[in-house]
Amino acid sequence: MTAEEPGRPPQAPATPTTAATPAASATEAATASTAATATTASTPWDLSPAVVAALVVALVCLGAGFIASRVELALVGVPLLIAAAYGWDRRPGDRIPLAFSASVEPARDGSTGRSPAAPASSTSPSIPTTETTAPTRTTQGAIVRAIGSVTTPTSTTPTRIDAVGVRIALPNRAPLDTVLTPRAATRIPADIVVVHSGPQLLLQLTVRVIGADASFVGDTAPAPALDRVVRPRVVPVRSLPLPARLIGLTGPHPSARPGDGGEFRDVDRFQPGDRLRRIDWKATARRAQSAGELFVRRTMATSDAAVQFVIDSRDDLTGRVADWAAMHPLPGVSSQDLAREAVVSLAGAYVAAGDRVGFDDLADPARAIPPRAGARHLHRVTRAVELTGPRGAVTERVRAPILAPGALVYVMSTFLDEQPLRLALVWRAAGHRVIAVDVLPGRLTRDLPPRERLALKVVEVERALRFRRLAAAGIDVLAWQDTDDDGAESGTRDARLRELSRPRRSR
């Protein structure tokens, strides 16, 4: 992370770019406003510990020199005492006003993300609020430029500020501490590769001002966080599995009950309530045994499918097993990225086919959305998926969520514990068709010590046993990640979806 200081020699550190894999499910910064967010604050001054230490050492040296009649001790203490007195004489006011600004804009250069910095004025205390726009196209590994700004009083005011200490928090890396001049702090850019989808903190500044000769320092002042919601990537889905029984009143799919609009079922005698246009005169001429006996053609009714997507957002793990317990894991596609991508892609395909979709989050029962159709409802579901993520402590569902009758259930989970398995078995026992979607990325184990490799084998065995129990109960398993070891698409996901989309009898 760096600062750019227009009009000065390039003495500030270079602007960092957070690393990421190009295959990550990164996307454009979404729907939140991209205009600069600004706020003001004031922080009190504190005497620097160096001044206090100089004063204590000076008094000790003077006292020791007077008692021991040693002039050299007094000569050591006098300069320190004069420096402490000079610093106290130049003490600033009670509080120092600060102004903060944060904005995000697309990088101008797709390869490096660099854009020329706008000149910042060092004599005006106003906040630079550059109007910015979010990227208009969804791309993997999108590069955006987050810009923070700290505006302090100018050097012409009685309160003199020599430097600004800034702690910069960026996604996918540990916070970075740096010291900038007041002019350089007016524009602090960072080129960020947006790796993950969902809610993200792009930039957070924590500021501490340093007075003249570092005699006084201000208290820590947090700047406003630059938050954005990143849309998940949408992949094309060509095959859509359907529920075992379609019970909707109308829709694009043929059902097993008699009705209008579907495929031919049989020819039967005319019954009260049958429509006259359904009379088959040729069949009547061949099969009628008496005058007035009529035969009608009966068809299968059409119906829509009710699809419920359930995300297990209690954990979010990347493929690098060594980072599962890390405070700042390395960039890489995570389980929640795959889960959001799966729900958004499948929900869009089902709504386009005329079906109803719903959403539920195992970590937050209040966010359940019942199945409905239409573009507006799809936007509601997509927005709920974008805001999904781990929150607080891990919770356990006591009761299984209530689903629409005959719904097809997709359970997006890593299946590292028993809760998604238990709920899937409950829904399957209730007559629903359930598809378990494994969203745990491929594991990278080259950085693991032997003890952790053994622990990972135990975890993998437990997962395999859970998938075996799902298959024994008639639940289909689908692995969503569709890349091989080289990062290229393998096509196994599409092949599995085609297999699941074949007509099957109700079990």
Image: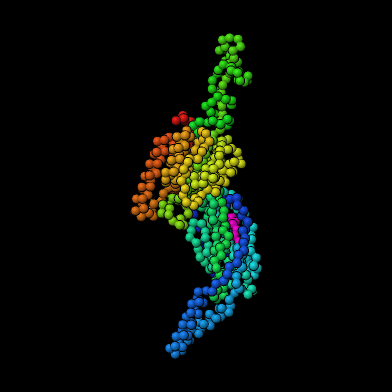
The prevailing secondary structure element of the residues shown in magenta is strand
Comparing 6 with 274, the one in front is 274
Magenta residues (range): 101-108
Give the residue displayed 55% in from the left and 55% down from the top.
Answer: 143
**Which quarter of the picture shows residue 448?**
bottom left
Q: Is residue 51 above or below residue 448?
A: below
* Residue under the point 51% across and 33% down: 406
- In this orientation, which residue lies closer to the viewer: 337 or 361? 361
> Does the stretch in magenta take in 104?
yes
| Any part of residue 24 in sight | no
For this rendering, which residue is in front, 161 or 366?
366
Q: Is residue 288 visible?
A: yes
Q: Residue at x 52, y 64 (%)?
A: 167
| Residue 128 x %, y % | 63, 63
Q: How far from the left and from the top, in percent, is residue 488?
A: 46, 46
The residue lying furthest to the front in this view is 398
Magenta stretch contains residue 297: no
